[in-house]
């Protein structure tokens, strides 16, 4: 993965960490048709974010692995 892609994955995980996001919103904001920019897929594949059912519908939350990733990059205390 390139440094630019890593930075975007970090941005996505940080954005979700602020508050759980509706799955549809995450896909709308972070999905891309460019095969070189698989930010959403990379974050899921690495285990940084996960889809979880809730009363409001499917939500995206940061996992423990995602929190560790954020702390390692100084984005979470």
Image (cartoon, grey):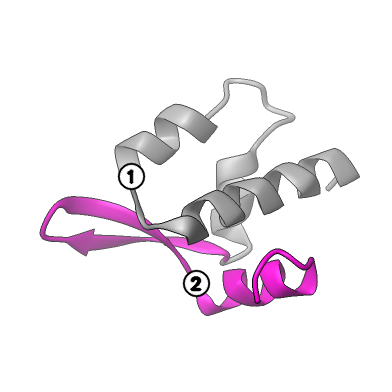
Left or right, 70 with reference to 73? left
Residue at the spot 84% in from the left edge and 39% down from the top edge: 4
Element at label 2: loop
Where is residue 54? Give x, y as percent.
Answer: 18, 62
Q: Magenta stretch containing residue 40, yes or no?
A: no
Q: Residues within 10 Å of mark 2 (few under 14, many from 20)?
A: some
User: Magenta segment range?
Assistant: 48-77
Cβ–Cβ under 8 Å for marks 1 and 2: no
Quadrant (top left, top right, bottom left, bottom right) of the C terminus: bottom right
Q: Nearer the viewer, residue 71 or 51?
A: 71
Left or right, 69 with reference to 66? right
Residue at the spot 36% in from the left edge and 57% down from the top edge: 20
Q: Which residue is mark 1?
A: 23
Q: Nearer the viewer, residue 1 or 10?
A: 10
Residue at the spot 59% in from the left edge and 47% down from the top edge: 12
Of all residues, the one furthest to the right in this rendering is 3
* Disc 1 to disc 2, C-alpha distance: 15 Å
Where is residue 9? Give x, y as percent.
Answer: 68, 49
Q: Which residue is mark 2?
A: 63
Of all residues, the one furthest to the front in this rendering is 77
Where is residue 33? Give x, y as percent.
Answer: 58, 20
Vertical placement of 1 versus 64: above or below? above
């Amino acid at each position: 993965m390139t440094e630019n892609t890593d930075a975007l994955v970090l941005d996505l995980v940080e954005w979700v960490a602020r508050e759980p996001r509706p799955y549809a919103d995450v896909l709308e904001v972070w999905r891309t048709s460019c095969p070189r920019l698989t930010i959403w897929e990379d974050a899921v594949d690495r285990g940084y974010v996960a889809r979880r059912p809730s009363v409001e519908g499917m939500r995206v939350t940061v996992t423990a692995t995602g929190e560790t990733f954020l702390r390692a990059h100084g984005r979470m205390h």
